[in-house]
Image (cartoon, grey):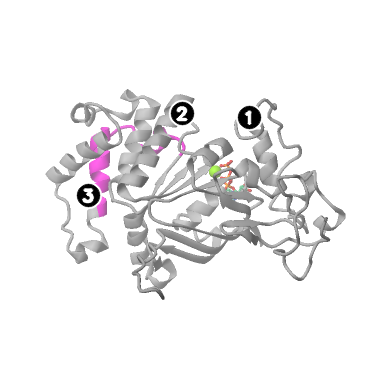
Amino acid sequence: MTENGTVRAPAAVPVVEVEDLTVRVRRGSTLLTLVEGLSYQVAPARSLAIVGESGAGKSIGIRAVLGLLDPRRFEVTGTVRLAGVDLATLPKAKRRGLVTSVASLVFQDPTRSLNPTMRVGPQIAEAMLAGSGRPDEAAGEPAVGRAEARRRSVELMRDVGIAAPEERYFAYPHELSGGMRQRIVIAIALACQPKVIFCDEPTSSLDVTTQAAIIDLLDGLRESRSIGTVVVTHDLALAASRAEQVLVMYGGQAVETLPAKGIARTSRMPYTQALIRAVPDVGTPGRPPRPIEGLPPDPRTPPPGCAFAPRCEHVRDDCAEERPALVEVSTGHSVRCWHPVAVTGQETTAANLPAARQPEVTR
Ligand SMILES: Nc1ncnc2c1ncn2[C@@H]1O[C@H](COP(=O)(O)OP(=O)(O)OP(=O)(O)O)[C@@H](O)[C@H]1O
Ligand SMILES: [Mg+2]
């Protein structure tokens, strides 16, 4: 109840909450940091795009959230809550069950996600049967029988836009186009009725028209089934046009997170701006895309200051001294930069930057 007596709807529990996720890999006697201090959350039916160049830690970050990294090689710290449940509070055996009942993962290449020797329909039904022996049976949901799994799989195939699903149920993956195969992978991802779908470059192996159709499909499912989506992509244009929130990763860290709408105007991190200039359709129309010079940092030799400093066209002497923190500059917008730029190209006020080291203010 609010002060004036109206009843406020309770805020939806995020389908995924990640707090201070750090991933290190063992290399000989040392530990290399691949992802550091990553935090984000996604509410039901909302979408987050994670963008950044190759090697930024996008895939490793997702695999860590889903508990898919081999603990003998990777050390993962931080908090992951799926549908409000902190995975660390569950015994190991139950953790896997919760992850598979709440979250699904769609990979870039549908051919590798499907079993080439098995007809596609039964692959969906199998995922459903595997998922139906899960913990929420205790909450009154009966396990799905074979006939029911088959009926629901045909329905799912229809839902993901596959025409004549009764016939295609019996097709082998190689008998379908790339786009159709990715739709089957999405149907498999939906089989356990997940609350969140993680997609790692879901469309990069597809042609442009099919890419758009698959993204349309994911958007439709997000709304109709109230599923949250986390889409990893190199394609900033895609991220900006389809997601609600964008998280930009660089050298294993979030360097900017901001609402996707108007990103070309609102971004204040030089790296995000460089990414924007590197794609033709998000930057200024008519201006040719400009690739970012230089290479991203190597996790074996992390730079002492801002990781982007060696490639940044706004770099100042003090940028390379210390790592900047990720600082909120407005609601839903945080930046990791000593000298965030404004749309006008002017440096912004220091009001929101860490007190320990305030940059001079340009008036
Ligand atoms: N299995 C692994 N063992 C050790 N290091 C790894 C492993 N997989 C990835 N890395 C390293 O982790 C860092 C992040 O890799 P990751 O695959 O997450 O990047 P990415 O952002 O997904 O890149 P891409 O866009 O190319 O898919 C890279 O430096 C990579 O070399
Ligand atoms: Mg990747």
For the point 81% across and 56% down, the residue is 319
Comparing 299 with 316, the one in front is 316
Give the magenta part as a residue range.
108-131
The secondary element bearing badge 2 is classed as loop
Is 97 placed left or right of 59 in the picture? Answer: left
Is residue 28 visible in this depiction of the protein? no
**Does the rendering let one see residue 319?**
yes
Around disc 3, counting alpha carbons within 10 Å, would you say few (fewer than 14), some (14 to 19), or many (20 or more)? many
Q: Which circle, 1 or 3, is nearer the viewer?
A: 1
Report the residue marked by disc 1. Answer: 280
**The residue under label 3 is which amino acid type?**
Leu
Where is 155 relative to 319, above or below? above
Q: For the residues marked 2 and 1, what is the alpha-carbon distance in whole angstroms?
A: 19 Å
Q: Mark number for residue 206? A: 2
Q: Which amino acid does label 1 sit on?
A: Pro
Disc assigned to residue 129: 3
Determine the CA span between mark 1 and mark 3.
45 Å
The N terminus: image quadrant: bottom left
**In the displayed structure image, the side of residue 332 where residue 173 appears, left or right:** left
The local crowd at label 2, few if under 14, some if 14 to 19, many if 20 or more residues have their Cα within 10 Å, is some
> Image quadrant for the C terminus?
bottom right
Quarter location, residue 357: bottom right
Pointers 2 and 1 in contact (CB under 8 A)? no
User: What secondary structure is marked by label 3?
Assistant: helix
Residue 174 located within the stretch drawn in magenta: no
Give the dominant element type of the magenta stretch: helix, strand or loop: helix
**First along the sequence among labels 2 and 3:** 3
Contact (Cβ within 8 Å) of mark 1 with mark 3: no
Mark in the foreground, 2 or 1? 1
The answer to whether the residue bearing label 1 lies less than 8 angstroms from the nearest atom of ligand 1 is: no
